[in-house]
Amino acid sequence: MRTGLLILSGFNMRAVIALCRWAAAAGVPVHVVARHAKDPIYLTDYAAQVMAVRTSETLDVAETTGWIAQLRGTYGYTQVFIAPSTEFFNRFLLQHRSEVEAAGGLIPLVEESLYIRISDKEAFAEICAAHGVAVPAVFDALPATYPFVAKPRSYGAATSGQIKPYLIFTADERAHFVARERPEQFFYQEFVDGQSVYLLLHVARNGSITACAQENLIQQSAGGSIVLAGVHDFHCAPAAAPYLALLASLGFHGLVMIEIRLCQRTGRAVMIEANPRMWGPMQFTLDQHVDVFAPLLADYGVYTDVIIDRPTRQSYYFWSGGLSRQQPFAYHHFTPDRFVADYQSIASADLFARPDTRPLHAYELTDA
């Protein structure tokens, strides 16, 4: 059965590039749909894999199935494996699963109801609490004391359209939140201080697990993207077992990133949120010689014999393009002095300062 990979570019570019790199190394055909004519993919070696440009920002079933038909007609694919690249796209695929699959698309996601229960922050927090997995304490109403975290009850619930939570440390930040949002669309949790860890997983349908973990060291302000991370062994620790058991009990399979705080006050591993899709720092997973793409494909009987030459193992994940002169950064058990002291090792892991993406790297640094 001949299968091609399809990925939408323009969003979650760090994950898009990681998949394109993996596919090039594995000899797996990957085809890219660009967001528009100025998509960052054109600043990489993978511009040659662009097979179409979206006609609009709005996803359309007919256009999506048209891409599948184009690839099947041009390359003789029996089916087209669609990369689960972004939350918005994944939900679109699940809403229109029958049409996309009828056209020959292969969607590597669980059923829609389970996906939403894991992805929606309040729903998954409730599931975790019911299964004995520690979660932040929940406030009954909008708190008047600080700090606290305001999270949309479900994806797209925020009036402003903001997806990420609000980290609220001051009265001014609380006032800004109330002016911008409808508070009833949010739920409120304590802010958990401590080491920030990502548990990075592929769970196969037979229950086998490919796992990795990272400790987040520097993050963009207001809960933005991770800029610097290092190796962590959380996936090997006993504290990871309840998460794996929970996913198994739910019947989950696929890619998932779970954000965890190792609470400095209680020592407990506290679940912050889960993202059942490709994650931004996927390159770090691959740089640790933990291949989550191969088992994702193999779970659907696709490219089951992939062999890749391993690159030099990196000690860090570093996205220099995520640095900006205009914002402060959140340091998680890390300091500017440590950054300077270990900069040579950090710089060697720079996400886009690599031969296939040097123009994109230069663009991001100039644009910052």
Image (cartoon, grey):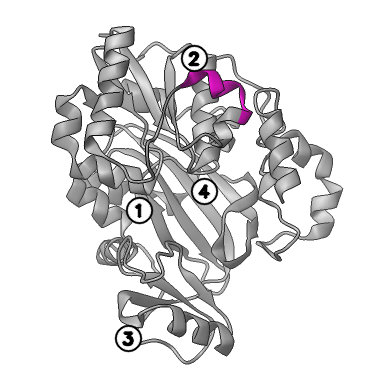
Q: CA distance from mark 4 to mark 3?
A: 32 Å
Region of the chain picked out in magenta, as a range: 43-50
Asked whether residue 20 is drawn in magenta, I would say: no
Q: Residue at x 75, y 41 (%)?
A: 346
Dot label at residue 26 = 2
Q: Quadrant of the N terminus?
A: top left
Residue to which mark 1 is pinned: 242
Q: Earlier in the sequence, mark 1 or mark 2?
A: 2
Q: Are marks 1 and 4 in contact (CB under 8 Å)?
A: no
Q: Is residue 340 above or below residue 303?
A: below
Mark 3 is surrounded, within 10 Å at the Cα level, by few (under 14), some (14 to 19) or many (20 or more) other residues, namely few
Type of the residue with mark 2? Ala
Residue to which mark 3 is pinned: 140
> In front here: 43 or 295?
43
Type of the residue with mark 1? Pro
Residue to which mark 4 is pinned: 234
Q: Main secondary structure of the magenta part?
A: helix
Instruction: Classify mark 2: helix, strand or loop.
Output: helix
Instruction: Classify mark 3: helix, strand or loop.
Output: loop
Classify residue 170 as left or right of residue 236. right
Q: Are marks 4 and 2 in contact (CB under 8 Å)?
A: no
Q: Position of residue 145 (x, y in %)?
A: 50, 90
Q: Nearer the viewer, mark 4 or mark 2?
A: 2
Q: Position of residue 83 (x, y in %)?
A: 37, 31
Q: CA distance from mark 1 to mark 3?
A: 27 Å
Mark 2 is surrounded, within 10 Å at the Cα level, by few (under 14), some (14 to 19) or many (20 or more) other residues, namely some
Residue 217 figure quarter = bottom right
Q: Are marks 1 and 2 in contact (CB under 8 Å)?
A: no
Q: Earlier in the sequence, mark 1 or mark 4?
A: 4
Q: CA distance from mark 3 to mark 2?
A: 51 Å
